[in-house]
Image (spheres, grey):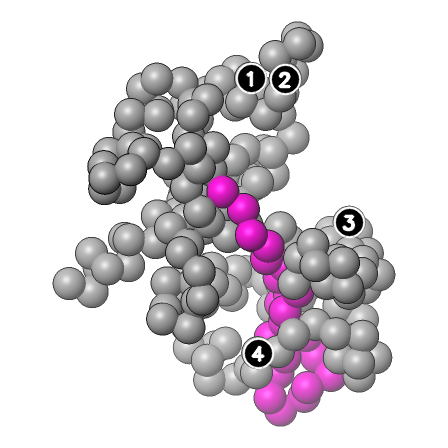
Amino acid sequence: MAFLADKCEFCELTEAVLAQCEQFVCGNDDLDDFFANDATKYARFLMGKSYCFRLRKNPRKIVCALTVSNDSIRIYDLPRGRRDYMKSLTHHEKPLRRYPGVLIGRLGVGDEFARKGIGSETLDFIKGWFYSSDNKTGCRFVIVDAVNDERVIAFYRKNGFMELFSSEEQEFAYTAGKKRTPVKLDTRLMYFDLLKLRQATS
């Protein structure tokens, strides 16, 4: 995580920060508009918290931005095989209907910093952040609704994320699509098991 740790400062993305910084442009119009106009509204209504990394030598430059919120993985209505697998990942003292996690709702890297590994560095930061003792709640998984594009899915796989479902048909049913004919999904639900960090350091 050399670039972010060595050359950037981490802070909440507030209206004051946005006013101090150059406009954040990551090449995705929806993300650009969200961070410019909606991120602080989400925070005001406690629906998500946005943060950014800014260059230390030029704090007006936002390198990347992200939004996180509380979430969970519903276990009780997963297909049998996947449900048994997810249950095998935890203790069996008391079965839970949901497993706690944090959702990466938005993640964007500035255009001029793209293709330099900063997206992966940001994911590593988020993993460590919610695995650390600073996290005040139980958080087993980092969850993302990844854009259903081969390059995006491959990016998250490279960073240790797995699809929750083996097929889009299963995921369609899980995401309340039972009453309609299945269509190609816009996103795929993926997760990273934070206990992998313990295994990696043990």
Q: Which residue is mark 2?
A: 177
The residue under label 2 is which amino acid type?
Answer: Gly
In the image: residue 68, left or right of residue 167: right
Q: Which residue is mark 1?
A: 173
Asked if the residue at tag 3 contacts the one at tag 4, i.e. Cβ–Cβ closer than 8 Å, the answer is: no
Q: Which residue is mark 4?
A: 10
Instruction: Kindly identify the residue that appears in the image at 52 percent across and 35 percent down.
Output: 189
- Residues at marks 4 and 3, CA–CA distance in whole angstroms: 23 Å
Residue 200 in the image, given as x and y percentages of width and height: 22, 59
In the image: residue 132, left or right of residue 171: left
Nearest-to-viewer mark from 1 and 4: 1
> Mark 1 or mark 3, which has the lower sequence index?
3
Instruction: Kindly identify the residue that appears in the image at 54 percent across and 33 percent down.
Output: 188
The residue under label 3 is which amino acid type?
Answer: Asp
In the rendered view, would you say 95 is above or below 161?
above
Magenta residues? Answer: 50-72
- Residues at marks 2 and 4, CA–CA distance in whole angstroms: 39 Å
- Residues at marks 3 and 2, CA–CA distance in whole angstroms: 24 Å
Residue 16 in the image, given as x and y percentages of width and height: 80, 81
User: Foreground residue, 123 or 143?
Assistant: 143
